[in-house]
Amino acid sequence: MKREENRLDQEIKKRLQEESIHIPDLVEEKWQQALANLPSKKKPVFSYRKWGASAAAILCIGFGYFVYTSQTVPFAELGDVKERMESIFLNNESKETKTNPKHVEQETPQLAESPIQETKEVLEPENQNVVSQVVKEDQNAVPQTNQSEEDPVQHPKDSAASSTVWVAESSDVSDPEISLPAVGEKTSVQSVEQEMEMIEEASVVSGPEPFHLENIYQQFSNDIYIFAKSHADSIPVEPISYQIQGEGIGMSIETSYAYGEEKDAFLLRQTVIDKTERERLSAQFLFLKNPSGTAFFEPLELEGQVIYIYPEAENSRYAAEMIIGNQWIQLQCVSYDLSQKELSDLVKRLVLSKQHLS
Amino acid sequence: MFFPPKKISKEKDDIDLAKSGDSDAFVRLMEAHKLSLYKVGKSYLKSDEDVADAMQETILKAFHSIHKVRENLYFKTWLTRIMIHECINILRKSQRIIPVEEFASDLLIKEEKFYEGQGIFEQVQKLPKEIAQVIVLFYYEDHSCQTISKMLGIPESTVRTRLNRGRNRLRNLLRLEGDQADEKGRK
């Protein structure tokens, strides 16, 4: 049956295909017309599908960048600095050290070591001589530190490279033999090493005490200086405003201070207002423990438009965390082991990476 | 070593060229399949004008979407499907779809003057449309039942049934024609 069908199919095919089929002129004419009028087909550079993929990729990258910039993941270098900061200033052991004088003997040499090591790493090659000098001094530093229990801390006053340090007030000095400078007293130090030691001692002594802001020195421009001197206890929760009309900068800077939730934190808010009374920049700086009590603020002009204010410290150390608008910026600006230029570059990089300022 | 037939190989080259935007290659391809498209069109549409319109649309659509052809081997199938689609579109627009029952009843009346002085192809067009379509695709275009079922979107068994009907008709038709030729020869 199948074979019969196949045979028949073959026969039909043969008969059908033998017949010549003529295409009518009408059809032929339209056919030729259609072929002659084919639209010019250029290979598309980007098809819709490719456009879609490109757009999706751009959106993904943009979203990723947004997430990256909005998250508070600390930079690696800042993380290290923060850890070191915490180990020094936020370490419970230091508080215990204060309460238990026996621990001072054990802890003080360790505390004295770390800044020297850090200073050694960071100092630039041109300061190698200083480093070597510091290291040499450091070798003798441990016995000196041990002696510090017996002898009061000495603050050399005659110094060629004097740097100003405001020392926090200590109301609870457990060790009467450790003498601290008076509130707001300027102390000159000879070297970074000695200064570091002094600051550490101050922090150790003042451990659990609420942070006392002794002096705030604000430098808004070369022409205008505000010297805000206030005591920690006198800083109200409600902000205080300072209205300054700057010469040449054409803007007023409103500064307010307030304590944070923690007693050892200190919040500073700065608002820069331009001539049109519109807020140009609102920045908050939350300072954690600042043993030196020193904070420098200097205007930094970036891209010629907005003045970003960043904390900077000279031969002192402090940690700051910055809130700009709704953006929390981890700005552990520690001059601890960074040179002024390194710190500036770091802060610039941070601020620029958080260009959510309006 | 196996070498593909020259014609197929050349067509494959033309398909590749046409895919890359070569208009001349596309025209060559269309010319090669012009008659096939016409036959398929005639199995759907009565009017030559409609067939010409369907062929024009097929050319344009094929030209714009030839890059979508994945396998060059199935180019003819792909092109035929476009043509069938265009024919159906024209039929829908003109609402000239005649129900099968109605067409079959007409067929009996027309059957007597079915074969007089007409070619086989013309007589095939007078068969019920669904049978004519299968006959054209199977006998003229040499497609398999499986391919036809995919092209028309109907089960393969339906294709076989229609083909069987068509085969019987063609057998009668060819026999009649043969008889007529014999008679003419005697005269």
Image (cartoon, coloured by chain):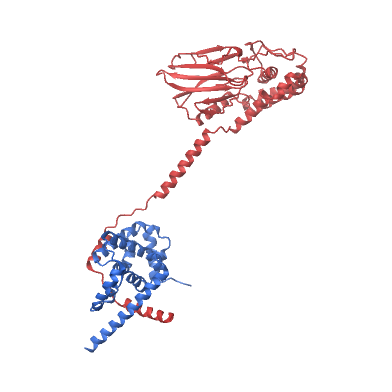
Q: Can residue A309 be seen at all in this image of the molecule? A: no
Relative image position of residue A33 (x, y in whole percent): 25, 61
Quadrant of residue B154 within the rendered picture = bottom left
Depth check, front residue: B82 or A58:
B82
A79 relative position to A245: left or right: right
Which residue is most to the left? B187
Against A137, residue B174 (above or below) is: below
In this rendered view, identify the residue nearer to me: A161 or B82.
B82
Q: Residue at x 72, y 24 (%)?
A: A93
Which residue appears at 53% of the width and 25% of the height? A323
**Residue A213 position within the rendered picture, expressed as x and y whole percent measured from the top left:** 60, 15
What is the display colour for chain B?
A: blue
Above-or-below relation of B134 to B57: below
Chain letter of the red region: A
Q: Quadrant of residue B81?
A: bottom left
Say how many tags the image has: 0
Residue A56 x, y percent position in the rendering: 45, 44
Position of the N terminus of chain A, as image quadrant, is: bottom left
Q: B148 left or right of B95?
A: right
